[in-house]
């Protein structure tokens, strides 16, 4: 389903996208109320991550004077890549580091639309042309257990429209789980039945009943085998979205991960074009392939960037935001930024402290954000001296106590020679890993990650990765392969009494949906963007950040009485075959009855 407002025809956005970087700030017309006064409306965007850059992009294309205020001296937020200090020699670039690997599921549609409109030298499809399909996911088991290689390509002959029935779905999902896992038949049958319950639940039941139910409870994980809990509980939550299955909202897990990412992705529905598969990654470090070209393009559109900007307070008086108090990250050079409109595109944990009592009283949804939660999901890069043949995609170490996931990156960087382009020439690949569980003891030191030193975390992560992929008579990675490592510098104080993480991940325990704010606030010149803002995708993702930006821009355009076309918003795919069953469930929900397929 897509939503769009505004007139059709050759829009400003399409014209600017076609002319590309040649369009300068001086060529952009004034818009909205400011146009009548012969001036350009000024917008302060607070935050230069994916949501902030997406806001700047849409507004700049519509003629607004945009200034982005960013805490760091680089753009991209958690999506940026980072140089490993002191790693370059011989004219090469520094080794590429990152907050943690990122991927672009096929159901992303809002973000790829933006990426198509970012010019890239030699690429007709913009930076979206830098995406590469992963073809397989490895669910790695320990103790010699057989690994599960899960193909990520859409099915060769997907069912035609109208052919997807509940019977067909039950048979296909049952057959896949029966083939791929060692689960007993009765456990497979029960899980498939629970999927049918969610697939045919109306929106009201999902937002009320399933939003309040943990995924662990929804699939009755406590009543079944350890294998059932590991594969269908923990593996679908903690390892993917850093939320424990015992807490994760069934609405979010079922709708986004099970339906949009896996089920409809495999069937080739709701994907970003005919060349998109379930899992995609970039063909170079993120900043090279995406963020740096984005900055270049936004600069050509007249966007101004102010770095080292630590937002301390959103100032409020007489029903409006009157300015934003900003300092350097070290607390120096206090200043006040003013604009006609303000879009706060900061992570929720950094936005909340900037809202004073008066602003919170003006819009109670800001105060509700205090109930939103974050957790740690942090990357460690291992630079290796030989190609590591893990899998052509991601590795999910299902049995690792720290929920380790990984990917070998150089295999997707078709435009790069890793050894020739990065570091000192010895590293030929980067195995990028993520640690998502920080409160469970590891296998080497018997301590949770939060209690370990940085070096201990690195050794534990490496050991848990080896424990997962080195089995069944194969040794895919060895200690001799490892040259060096890099860990996200946002995590500090490790091994001490107060470890901290400046860049945690927004998570989705039960009830989260009802605490999330909308992009439009009750303050007429303040708007919100970020992966914590209410979006249809309902998951802490780059897609959610981009969708929230589009919603914030549309709200600003409405407030400004702008005649510019509103941003198009793509919503998650809804199979038409299941809509009649959802309407039946809506009636049953109103009558207080369970879903037709809900056997308890």
Image (cartoon, helix red, strand yellow):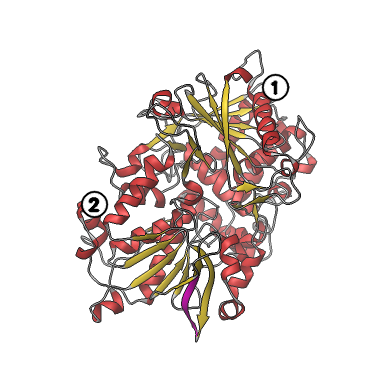
- Residue 58, relative to residue 117: is it above or below? below
**Quarter of the rendering occupied by the N terminus:** bottom left
Question: What residue is shown with label 2?
Answer: 21
Q: Picture coordinates of residue 319 (x, y %)?
A: 50, 84
Q: In the current view of this chain or complex, which residue is farthest to the bottom?
A: 318
- For the residue pair 178 and 503, the one nearer the viewer reads as 503
Number of dots carrying numbers:
2
Q: Which label is found at residue 587?
A: none
Left or right: 489 in relation to 326: right
Q: Which residues are magenta?
A: 319-325
* Main secondary-structure element of the magenta-colored stretch: strand
Can the viewer see residue 574?
A: no
Q: Picture coordinates of residue 360 (x, y %)?
A: 59, 76
- Residue 247, relative to residue 425: is it above or below? below
SS at mark 1?
Answer: loop
Question: What residue is shown with label 1?
Answer: 145
The stretch drawn in magenta includes residue 311:
no
Left or right: 531 in relation to 192: left
Q: Picture coordinates of residue 521 (x, y %)?
A: 50, 73
Which residue sits at x=39%, y=66%? 553
Can the viewer see residue 514?
A: yes
- For the residue pair 570 and 124, the one nearer the viewer reads as 124
Q: Picture coordinates of residue 31 (x, y %)?
A: 27, 73
Left or right: 59 in relation to 407: left
- Residue 541, relative to residue 139: is it above or below? below
Q: Nearer the viewer, mark 1 or mark 2?
A: 2
Mark sitting earlier along the chain (1/2): 2
- Residue 176, relative to residue 534: is it above or below? above
């Amino acid at each position: 389903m897509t939503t769009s407002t505004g007139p059709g025809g050759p829009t400003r956005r399409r014209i600017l996208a076609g002319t590309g970087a040649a369009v300068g700030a001086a060529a952009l017309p004034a818009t909205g109320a400011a146009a009548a006064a012969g001036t350009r409306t000024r917008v302060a965007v607070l935050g230069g991550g994916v949501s902030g850059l997406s806001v700047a992009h849409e507004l700049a294309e519509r003629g607004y004077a945009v200034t982005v205020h960013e805490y760091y001296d680089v753009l991209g937020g958690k999506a940026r890549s980072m140089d490993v200090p002191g790693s370059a020699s011989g004219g090469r670039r520094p080794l590429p580091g990152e907050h943690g690997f990122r991927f672009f599921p096929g159901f992303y549609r809002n973000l790829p639309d933006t990426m198509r409109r970012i010019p890239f030298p030699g690429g007709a499809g913009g930076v979206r042309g830098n995406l590469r399909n992963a073809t397989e996911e490895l669910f790695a088991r320990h103790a010699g257990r057989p690994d599960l290689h899960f193909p990520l390509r859409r099915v060769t002959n997907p069912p035609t429209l109208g052919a997807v029935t509940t019977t067909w779905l039950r048979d296909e999902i049952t057959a896949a789980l029966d083939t791929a896992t060692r689960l007993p038949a009765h456990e497979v049958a029960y899980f498939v039945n629970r999927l049918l319950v969610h697939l045919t639940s109306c929106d009201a039941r999902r937002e009320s009943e399933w939003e309040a139910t943990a995924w662990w409870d929804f699939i009755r994980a406590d009543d079944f085998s350890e294998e059932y809990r590991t594969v269908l509980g923990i593996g679908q939550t903690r390892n993917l979205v850093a939320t424990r299955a015992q807490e994760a909202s069934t609405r979010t897990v079922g709708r986004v991960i099970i339906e949009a990412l896996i089920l409809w992705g495999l069937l080739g529905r709701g994907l970003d074009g005919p060349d998109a598969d379930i899992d995609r990654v970039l063909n170079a470090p993120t900043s090279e392939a995406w963020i740096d070209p984005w900055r270049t393009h936004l600069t050509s559109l007249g966007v101004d960037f102010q770095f080292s900007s630590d937002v301390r307070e959103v100032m409020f008086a007489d029903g409006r935001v009157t300015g934003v108090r900003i300092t350097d990250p070290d607390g120096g050079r206090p200043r006040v930024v003013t604009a006609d409109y303000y879009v706060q595109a900061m992570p929720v944990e950094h936005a909340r402290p900037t809202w004073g009592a008066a602003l919170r009283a003006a819009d109670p949804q800001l105060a509700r954000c205090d109930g939103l939660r974050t957790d740690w999901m942090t990357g460690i890069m291992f630079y290796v001296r030989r190609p590591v043949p893990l899998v052509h995609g991601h590795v999910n170490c299902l049995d690792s106590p720290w929920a380790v996931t990984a990917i070998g990156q150089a295999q997707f960087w078709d435009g790069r020679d890793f050894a020739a382009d990065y570091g000192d020439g010895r590293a030929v690949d980067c195995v990028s890993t993520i640690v998502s569980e920080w409160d469970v003891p590891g296998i080497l030191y018997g301590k949770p990650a939060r209690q370990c030193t940085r070096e201990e975390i690195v050794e534990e992560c490496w050991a848990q990765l080896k424990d997962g992929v080195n089995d069944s008579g194969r040794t895919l990675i060895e200690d001799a392969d490892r040259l060096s490592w890099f860990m996200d510098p946002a995590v500090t104080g490790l091994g001490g009494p107060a470890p901290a993480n400046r860049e945690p991940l927004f998570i989705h325990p039960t009830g989260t949906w009802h605490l999330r704010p909308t992009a439009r606030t009750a303050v007429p010149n303040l708007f919100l963007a970020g992966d914590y803002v209410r979006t249809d995708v309902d998951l802490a993702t780059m897609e959610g950040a981009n969708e929230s930006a589009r919603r914030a821009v549309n709200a600003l355009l409405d407030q400004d009485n702008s005649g510019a076309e509103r941003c198009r918003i793509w919503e998650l795919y809804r199979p038409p075959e299941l809509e009649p069953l959802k309407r039946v469930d809506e009636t049953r929900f109103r009558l207080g009855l369970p879903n037709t397929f809900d056997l308890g």
